[in-house]
Image: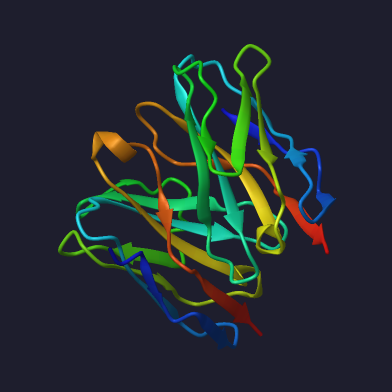
Amino acid sequence: EAGVVQSPRYKIIEKKQPVAFWCNPISGHNTLYWYRQNLGQGPELLIRYENEEAVDDSQLPKDRFSAERLKGVDSTLKIQPAELGDSAVYLCASSSPSLAVYGTQYFGPGTRLLVL
Amino acid sequence: AQTVTQSQPEMSVQEAETVTLSCTYDTSESDYYLFWYKQPPSRQMILVIRQEAYKQQNATENRFSVNFQKAAKSFSLKISDSQLGDAAMYFCAYRTLFGNEKLTFGTGTRLTIIP
């Protein structure tokens, strides 16, 4: 079974430029999460999707961040314009409704963003 | 709000020895999940072990086991027969059983394996 796929793995941009990250969850996982991990800290949730519906976006800075999951499968997270403080690792995770693994989130390799 | 505390920023252990990483959490809920994730330099978060709070038996996965003390709100990870590949950041995480499904992470413990 393929894991969570993310691209790109690394991105370097100048401040005020736009950037987008893509995530494809594990097949059959209806819940998708975007986390941001700052240096030396644990990940923090930005947004959670149940199928195509964003059910928790309370921590998403909506003035510059946006996300979509149009067909309830893959998702895109966008930042426009990027700021220096957005430099971080952006992690995508997915989870299954299966009782056997209920509650467990599986993570992708992340995208490391550096804003200059 | 739930909080997760990892009081050991760094730990080291000799190869083949045993090490225990500490984690405490704060919650008013009675049912929840706890996890340990490993994050090597590649930055991918890899699930190590999971514990359901309603289960009294401590979870084990090969060389990894936990000591879950619900009353003390403690959830430590024991790694036996440490191997060089165990070197990584280890994060403890909490998730409610129902409702808000986000994971709340601690700040991590960096584990070094000494050959």
Residue B105 shown left or right of residue A30 in the figure = right
The image shows residue B29, relative to residue A43, as above or below, that is above
- Count numbered badges in the picture: 0
Q: Nearer the viewer, residue B84 or B112?
A: B84
Query: Which percent across, then down, holds residue A62?
Result: 43, 59
Instruction: Determine the image quadrant of residue A27.
Output: bottom left
Query: Which percent across, then down, holds residue A48?
Result: 35, 49
* Residue at the far top in the pictured view: B71
Residue B115 shown left or right of residue A4 in the figure = right
Residue A83 shown left or right of residue A101 in the figure = right
The image shows residue A59, relative to residue B87, as above or below, that is above
Q: Nearer the viewer, residue A87 or B109?
A: B109
Residue drawn at 40 percent across, 52 percent down = A47
The image shows residue A2, relative to residue B3, as above or below, that is below
Instruction: Determine the image quadrant of residue B76.
Output: top right
Q: Quadrant of the C terminus of chain B?
A: bottom right
Q: What coloring was used for the rendering?
A: rainbow
Residue drawn at 66 percent across, 50 percent down = B90
Query: Which percent across, then down, holds residue A4?
Result: 36, 65
Q: Quadrant of the N terminus of chain B?
A: top right
Residue drawn at 35 percent across, 26 percent down = B98
Query: Which percent across, then down, holds residue B9?
Result: 81, 48
Q: Nearer the viewer, residue B45 or A49?
A: B45
